[in-house]
C-alpha cells in the first residue's frame, strides 16, 4: 500500500461493539481524508456469533491474519449466553498478549458540556491517564483446577510480575508524563502492604525508574486509597501507572467521574511497533442496551482518534478530537448515558458534520 493508505482490521465483536465500531470507523475515515490519508478496512466477523457457528471465537490463523494490518479497531466482546472466560480468553486477551501490547493507555478528561457525578468539578479539571500493564500480572492466565467440578475442587490463579514487564510499563508512564508536560506527576498504584512479593518488586522498580526522571514528581498510593482518591480528588492526577487488574478497576472509576463510561477510550499499544496496536473503548458489549441504537459511540471515536495519532496522522486525530469535543460542548446531540435522547447514528452525524 502507498504511504497514505493504512490497512485497518475492524473487529466489531458483540453487542454494542458492532454499533460503536461502525460509527467510529466512519468518522475516522472522514478525519483521515482531511489530511489526504485513506483507511482501508478489513472487517472480521469474529465474536460470539462466530462462536455459535464454529465453536471457537476466531479461526486458527487469526493472529497471523491480524499481523498484516497496521492497526486494529475493536468494539467489545461478551455475550450473556456464553461464559466470559470463553469469549474474552478466546478473542480480546490473546491479541493483547500475542502482540505484546503491554501499554494500555486510558485517558479520562472532563469535557466541556459534560457534568461529572462529583460536585463542583469544572471542564478540564480532570485530565488524567491510567497506564495499565496489559500482558502479565494478575491476567497472566497461569493456574488450573484440581478436582474440577467435585465438592473438593481447588482453583489456582497465579499472578506473574517480571522485572522486565514492570520496568517497561513504569518507564512508559514516566515518558508519557514527560511528553504530556502537564502536572509532571506519575502516581504508582501498589498493594505492597498485603502482597509482599509482586508489589514489593513493583515498588522497588518504580523507585529506580523514577530516579531516571528527576523532572517528574512521584506519588505512591495503595490501590484501596487510590480508589477513594479517584473520587475525592480526581483533579490532582496526571499519569497513573498500575498493574493489569488494578488498572482495569481504576479505569472504570476514572471513566465515571468524567461523566460516562460511554466516553472512556483506550489504546493497547506495542510501543516497539513490532506488532499492530489495538484501539477499543473501555466499555463492554452492554447487553442491556444492545440493538437499541442508543450506545454512546464517543468512547470508540476517541479510541479511533488515538489510532490515527498512533499511525502518525496527528492532524487528523486532532481534528476528530476537536469535533467530538465540539459536539459535547454544544450539548444538543447526546445519547441517554449523558442525559440526552439522541441515537448512536445522530451522534455520528453530528461528529461527521463538525469534521
Ligand atoms: P459494560 O461496559 O458492557 O456495561 C456497563 C454499563 O455501562 C451498562 O449499563 C451499559 O449499558 C453501560 N454502557 C457501557 N458502554 C456504554 C456506551 N457506549 N453507551 C452507553 N452506555 C454504556 O460492562 P458489563 O455489563 O460489566 O459487561 C458486559 C459484557 O461485556 C460482559 O460480557 C463483559 O465481560 C464484557 N466486557 C468486554 C469488554 C471488552 O471487550 N473490552 C470490556 C468490558 C466488559
Ligand atoms: C477492559 C475489560 C477487559 C479487561 C475484560 C473484558 C477481559 O474489562 O478492557 O477493561 O479486564 O481487560
Ligand atoms: Mn474493564
Image: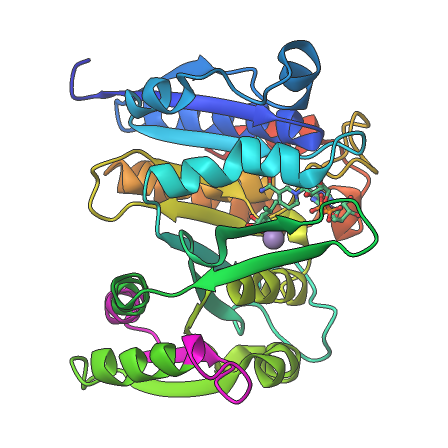
Q: Quadrant of the C terminus?
A: top left
Q: Residue at x 47, y 56 (%)?
A: 106
Q: Decide which of 326, 293 is in the foreground and name it.
A: 293
Say if the magenta span includes residue 23.
Answer: no
Task: Give residue 241's position: percent from left, percent from top.
Answer: 41, 70
Q: Decide which of 146, 228 is in the foreground and name it.
A: 146
Looking at the image, residue 26 sits to the left or right of residue 165; the answer is right
Q: Residue at x 36, y 37 (%)?
A: 98
Task: Give residue 163's position: percent from left, percent from top.
Answer: 27, 68
Looking at the image, residue 64 sits to the left or right of residue 26; the answer is left
Task: Give residue 203's position: percent from left, percent from top.
Answer: 36, 83
Q: Residue at x 67, y 23 (%)?
A: 48
Classify 235 as above or below 147.
below
Colouring chosen for the image of the structure: rainbow
Task: Give residue 13's position: percent from left, percent from top.
Answer: 60, 26
Say if the magenta span includes residue 191.
Answer: yes
Q: Residue at x 35, y 52 (%)?
A: 102
Q: Is residue 304 visible?
A: no
Say how many tags the image has. 0
Looking at the image, residue 15 sits to the left or right of residue 230; the answer is right
For this orientation, the residue located farthest to the top is 53
**Ligand 1's quadrant:** top right
Classify 221 as above or below 329.
below
Classify 173 as above or below 288.
below
Q: Decide which of 201, 253 is in the foreground and name it.
A: 201
Q: Quadrant of residue 335?
A: top right
Q: Magenta stretch?
A: 173-199
Q: Is residue 7 visible?
A: yes
Amino acid at each position: 500500500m502507498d504511504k497514505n493508505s493504512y490497512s485497518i482490521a475492524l473487529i466489531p465483536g458483540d453487542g454494542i461493539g458492532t454499533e460503536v465500531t461502525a460509527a467510529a470507523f466512519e468518522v475516522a475515515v472522514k478525519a483521515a481524508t482531511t489530511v489526504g490519508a485513506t483507511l482501508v478496512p478489513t472487517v472480521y466477523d469474529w465474536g460470539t456469533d462466530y462462536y455459535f457457528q464454529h465453536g471457537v471465537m476466531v479461526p486458527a490463523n487469526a493472529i497471523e491474519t491480524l499481523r498484516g494490518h497496521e492497526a486494529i479497531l475493536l468494539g467489545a466482546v461478551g455475550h450473556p449466553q456464553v461464559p466470559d472466560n470463553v469469549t474474552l480468553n478466546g478473542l480480546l486477551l490473546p491479541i493483547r498478549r500475542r502482540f505484546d501490547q503491554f501499554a494500555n493507555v486510558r485517558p479520562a478528561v472532563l469535557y466541556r458540556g459534560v457534568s461529572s457525578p462529583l460536585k463542583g468539578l469544572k471542564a478540564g479539571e480532570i485530565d488524567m491517564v491510567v497506564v495499565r500493564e496489559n500482558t502479565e500480572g494478575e491476567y497472566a492466565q497461569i493456574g488450573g483446577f484440581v478436582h474440577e467440578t467435585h465438592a473438593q475442587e481447588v482453583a489456582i490463579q497465579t499472578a506473574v510480575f517480571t522485572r522486565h514487564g514492570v520496568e517497561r510499563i513504569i518507564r512508559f508512564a514516566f515518558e508519557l508524563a514527560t511528553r504530556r508536560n502537564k502536572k509532571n506527576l506519575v502516581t504508582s498504584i501498589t498493594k505492597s502492604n498485603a502482597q509482599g512479593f509482586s508489589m514489593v518488586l513493583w515498588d522497588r522498580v518504580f523507585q529506580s525508574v523514577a530516579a531516571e526522571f528527576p523532572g517528574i514528581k512521584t506519588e505512591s498510593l495503595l490501590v484501596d486509597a487510590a480508589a477513594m482518591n479517584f473520587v475525592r480528588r480526581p483533579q490532582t492526577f496526571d499519569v497513573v501507572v498500575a498493574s493489569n487488574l488494578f488498572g482495569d478497576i481504576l479505569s472504570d472509576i476514572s471513566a465515571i467521574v468524567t461523566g460516562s463510561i460511554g466516553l472512556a477510550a483506550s489504546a493497547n499499544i506495542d510501543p516497539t511497533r513490532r506488532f499492530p496496536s489495538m484501539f477499543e473503548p473501555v466499555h463492554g458489549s452492554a447487553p442491556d442496551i444492545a440493538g437499541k441504537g442508543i450506545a454512546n459511540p464517543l468512547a470508540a471515536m476517541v479510541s479511533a482518534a488515538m489510532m490515527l495519532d498512533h499511525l502518525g496522522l496527528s492532524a487528523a486525530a486532532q481534528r476528530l478530537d476537536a469535533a467530538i469535543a465540539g459536539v459535547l460542548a454544544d450539548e444538543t446531540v447526546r445519547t441517554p448515558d449523558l442525559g440526552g435522547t439522541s441515537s448512536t447514528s445522530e451522534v455520528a452525524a453530528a461528529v461527521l458534520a463538525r469534521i
